[in-house]
Image (cartoon, helix red, strand yellow):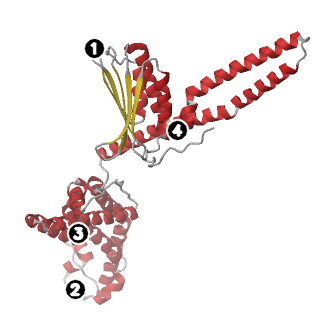
């Protein structure tokens, strides 16, 4: 295997580089890199079968595009070149050494104990030095001279071969295992996932986990609001109606009971209002029923500062269900800041879908006002909380607020991968 990989990869790399000026070398070089990856995969399979698995990255240079773009991605991926280095130089040298040592140990391990069988097919030597036991005894005692019959010599030879073979057989795992580990060490260094790639993967997993937690929180609050609306609110409303009916039927003379029911009715109204305010803090009903855009327009209508809403989401807007609650409260917080602190005469909210450098859709939110400016972000303040919320959604917040105004807050939030192009389809309660 290592000799075949060495020959093919050296020939492929030489031809590819040598003919690159004629452009025909590029396909040859790309094919050689893919072949090196195949040999590397085979080496990983062999190591896994030997009980020494090597962790590898499953992310390779793939993606859309024609042959030229794919070829450039492959040529620019250092992992392919590490596979070439492994298959063309490191593994052949290591393989020849380990194969020679391993094969010699296996041959002695199997051939020593079975020497009594296959020695009959060999011609018996006359010289003492050609007998293994004679050479060993002479090495221990230089004055030793072999004096025995042929049968005795053969018997002594069989015993010596058997002892040597058993010793080699007993130490065979102690020899083969380190040889396998040498191959595993080379594979980890050149074929395995590097420390930098592993750290990047861990960071990506942590980011995805945090993002999933943010979406799970939003989904949980949404479900809680729906449960409050369908459960306790409906129950309190029914109690309120029953108390009102009982109050109408009550006789005028029972003043004490009349006051008791009136107090209970007033308490249920106040409790119902508090519960509604609480549920609106979790997710406003308009946002639940109609979606983000009507809820934002409602925010603009209720603002003490005239607010213009500009929406550019295209004909088939993506489904923003997973983001709309967070986006709504970001806009609400920014408009509240404008009303309280900006001393502005007008404000503007714009929502648009754009593409980032990775060709992914991004929701871009821009909130601006013509107030006095000078906005500063302090620890523990409202803007710091907004930044934390936006960061949790893998977004970014940029605030441009020179003294004297205007103030512009630019927010970019990537659209979740599971969102698909579709119109908002909501059931109005």
**Mark whose residue sits in front, 3 or 4:** 4
Residue named by callout 4: 216
User: Tag on residue 152?
Assistant: none
Residue named by callout 1: 403
**Badge 1: residue crowd in 10 Å (few <14, some 14–19, many ≥20):** few
Residue 143 position within the rendered picture, expressed as x and y whole percent measured from the top left = 19, 72
- First-in-chain label (4 vs 1): 4
The residue lying toward the viewer, choosing from 49 and 370, is 370
Q: Residue at x 24, y 71 (%)?
A: 136
User: Is label 3 in contact with label 2 (beta carbons under 8 Å)?
Assistant: no
Residue 401 vs 47, above or below: the answer is above
Is 152 positioned to the left or the right of 279 in the image? Answer: left
Q: Secondary structure at mark 4?
A: helix
Q: Residue at x 91, y 11 (%)?
A: 253
Q: Secondary structure at mark 3?
A: helix
Quadrant of the frame with the N terminus: bottom left
- First-in-chain label (1 vs 2): 2
User: Is label 4 in contact with label 1 (beta carbons under 8 Å)?
Assistant: no
């Amino acid at each position: 295997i290592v000799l075949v990989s060495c020959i093919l990869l050296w020939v492929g790399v030489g031809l590819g580089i040598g003919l690159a000026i004629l452009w025909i070398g590029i396909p040859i070089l790309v094919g050689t890199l893919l072949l090196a990856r195949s040999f590397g995969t085979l080496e990983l399979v062999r190591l896994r079968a030997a009980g020494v698995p090597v962790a590898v990255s499953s992310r390779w240079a793939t993606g859309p595009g024609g042959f030229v773009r794919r070829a450039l991605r492959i040529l620019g991926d250092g992992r392919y070149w590490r596979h070439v280095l492994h298959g063309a130089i490191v593994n052949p040298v290591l393989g020849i050494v380990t194969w020679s040592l391993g094969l010699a140990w296996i041959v002695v391990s199997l051939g020593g104990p079975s020497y009594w069988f296959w020695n009959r097919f060999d011609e018996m030597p006359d010289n003492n030095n050609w007998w293994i036991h004679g050479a060993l005894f002479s090495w221990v005692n230089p004055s030793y001279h072999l004096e025995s019959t042929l049968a005795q010599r053969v018997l002594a030879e069989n015993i010596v071969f058997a002892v040597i073979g058993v010793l080699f057989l007993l130490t065979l795992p102690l020899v083969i295992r380190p040889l396998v580990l040498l191959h595993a060490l080379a594979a980890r260094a050149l074929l395995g996932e590097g420390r930098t790639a592993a750290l990047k993967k861990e960071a990506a997993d942590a980011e995805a986990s945090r993002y999933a937690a943010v979406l799970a929180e939003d989904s949980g609050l949404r479900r809680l609001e729906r449960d409050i609306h369908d459960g306790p609110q409906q129950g309190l409303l029914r109690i309120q109606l029953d108390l009102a009916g009982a109050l109408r039927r009550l006789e005028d003379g029972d003043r004490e009971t009349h006051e008791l029911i009136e107090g209970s009715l007033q308490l249920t109204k106040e409790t119902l209002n508090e519960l509604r305010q609480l549920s609106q803090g979790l997710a406003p009903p308009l946002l639940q029923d109609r979606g983000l855009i009507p809820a934002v327009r409602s925010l603009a209508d209720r603002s003490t500062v005239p607010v213009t809403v500009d929406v550019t989401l295209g004909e088939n807007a993506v489904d923003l269900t997973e983001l709309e609650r967070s986006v709504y409260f970001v806009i609400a917080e920014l408009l509240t800041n404008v009303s309280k602190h900006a001393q502005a005469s007008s404000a503007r909210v714009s929502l648009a879908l754009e593409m980032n450098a990775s060709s992914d859709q991004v929701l871009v939110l821009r909130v601006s006002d013509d107030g006095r400016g000078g906005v500063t972000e302090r620890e523990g303040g409202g803007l710091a909380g907004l930044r934390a919320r936006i960061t949790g959604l893998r977004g970014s917040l940029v605030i441009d607020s020179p003294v004297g105004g205007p103030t512009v807050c630019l927010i970019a939030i990537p659209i979740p991968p599971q969102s698909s192009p579709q119109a908002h389809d909501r059931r109005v309660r």
